[in-house]
Image (cartoon, helix red, strand yellow):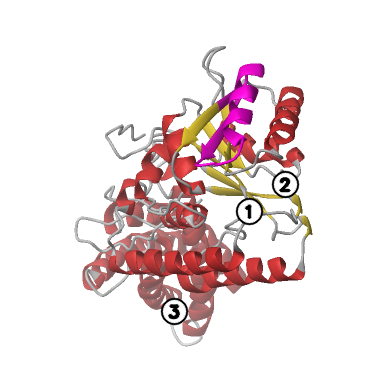
Amino acid sequence: MRTDSSPGTLPAREHLPAADAGTPVLDVVIPVHNEEKDLQPCVRRLRDHLARTFPYAFRITIADNASTDATPQVSRRLAAELPEVGAVRLEQKGRGRALRAVWSASDAPVLAYMDVDLSTDLNALLPLVAPLISGHSDLAIGSRLSHGSRVVRGTRREFISRGYNLILRGSLQARFSDAQCGFKAIRRDVAQVLLPLIEDTSWFFDTEMLVLAERAGLRIHEVPVDWVDDPDSSVRIVRTATDDLKGVWRVGRALATGSLPLDRLTRPFGDDPRDREVEDVPRHLPRQLVGFCAVGALSTVFYLLLYSGFRTFAGSQTANALALLVCAIANTAANRRLTFGVRGRAGAVRHQAQGLVVFGIGLALTSGSLAALDAAGGRPAHSTELAVLIAANLAATVLRFLLLRAWVFPDRGGPMAPGIPGPSAAGLYDTEAGDHR
C-alpha cells in the first residue's frame, strides 16, 4: 500500500473519531453579511439540533464578512454565551473568501457550511457528514435536484438553477447535480490541498471546488434535501449568474490548457485499492480463469465439430491432429486478446509459435488417450472416442492455462487497472484508468 505523505498528497482515508475532548470532529461555518435579524435564531437552532443529534463534539463558526450592521455584535454575543460557537470577522465580502479563511484555519477533521437562512432541513446534516467521518467520501453536497429532494421555490429560481447545472454539464462535463445549494462539507485533509487551487472568492467558489474535485477523481457524496426558498434572500441573481458564467469560462479554459495542477489531487490516497499488492492471490487470476474457461468452452465445441467432420474421411489420429491444429491457432488468438488482454500485432507470431508448442503437448495427451483406447481392443464406438477425448482435453486444459499464463502471456507486474492486465516489458498490454469516486 502506498504511504506517500509528501506535500500536495493526502493521507489514507480512514474513520475519524474525536481526537480529544477539546477538538471538535465537525466545524460548521455560517458565512454572513448583514444578517443581524436571522443570525441569532439560526445559530441557536443549529446548536440545539447538533447537541441533540450529532454524536461527536462540534463547533459552529460564524464568518462575518464585512457586515455593516449589528451582525458583528450579535456574533460576539453568541460566541460568549454558547461554548460551541465561535466568531470570525473578515473585512472583505465574499462567501468563498469566508469559507477559505475559516476552513484553512480550522482544526476539525470535517468542515461544513450552510446558509444562515436555514433553507435546508437540518435533518440532512448528519447524512451529509457521515460519509466523510467514516472515510467513504471526500466531499458531500446537498442537492435540490436529485431524486428524493423536496423543494419549495419560485419558478424563476427553479429555472435558473436547472439551467445553470445544465450549463455545467455541457461545458465542464460536471456529473454532480446541484452546484449552488448552500449545504456542503469537505474533509479537512482534502481542503488543505484543494483550497489553494480555487481562485474564486464569491458565489462561484462552490462550483469551482466541485469541478476541480471531480476532475481529480475525488469522491463526492450527494444528499437529497428538503429545501424552502427564502423570499428575503439578498442574493443578486443577475449579477451572480454573470459572475458564475465568467467562472465557468475561466475554469473551462484552465482545464483545456492543462494549467491547473490537478496532479496534486489525482489518486492521492494511500488506501486506493488500485495501489495494493495482493500477494496471496495472483493478480487477475479470477478474471483470467473466467476468460480462459469461456474461450475453452467455445474451443471444445469447435474442436468436436471439426473432429467429427474430419473423421468422415480420415482416421481418428489424423482427424484429432487436424482438429487440434485449427483449434490451437484460434484458441491462442482468442486467449491472447480476451483472456490476457494483449492488443496489437507485436509478438503475435511468437505467441502463435509458443501456442503450437502448447498444442503439441495437448496433442500428445489426446493422441495418447486414443492410442490407449485402441490398445484396449476392438473397434470403439464414436461416442466412446468422444468421451475419452473430452476427458483428455480437460486434463490438457489445466496444463494449457498454466503454460499460457506463465510462459506465453506472463504478467510482468506493470501498472495495474481493475480487470486489465498491466504492461509487459515489451509494452504489449493495454492499461485503462480506473473509477471515482
Q: Does the magenta stretch include residue 343?
A: no
Q: In this view, does 115 lie above or below 304?
A: above
Q: Can residue 218 be seen in this view?
A: yes
Helix, strand or loop under label 1: loop
Say whether disc 2 or disc 3 marks the residue closer to the N-terminus.
Answer: 2
Answer few, some or many: residues within 10 Å of disc 2's Cα (few below 14, many 20 plus, some between 14 and 19). Answer: many
Q: Dividing the picture into quarters, in which one does residue 270 lie?
A: top left
Q: Give the range drawn in magenta.
A: 59-86
- The amino acid at mark 1 is Cys
Name the residue at 44% across, 40% down.
Answer: 91
Which residue, given by chain and number where applicable, does mark 1 sit on?
A: 181
- The amino acid at mark 3 is Gly
For the residues labelled 1 and 3, the Cα–Cα distance comes to: 78 Å
Q: In this view, does 294 lie above or below 269?
A: below
Q: Which residue sits furthest bottom?
A: 313
For residue 315, which numbered disc appears in the image?
3
Q: Is residue 72 magenta?
A: yes
Where does the image place residue 85, in percent across and percent down from the top left?
61, 24
Helix, strand or loop under label 3: loop
For residue 120, which numbered disc appears in the image?
2
Question: Are the residues flagged by discs 1 and 2 in contact, CB closer than 8 Å?
Answer: yes
Along the line of sight, the residue nearer the viewer: 257 or 354: 257
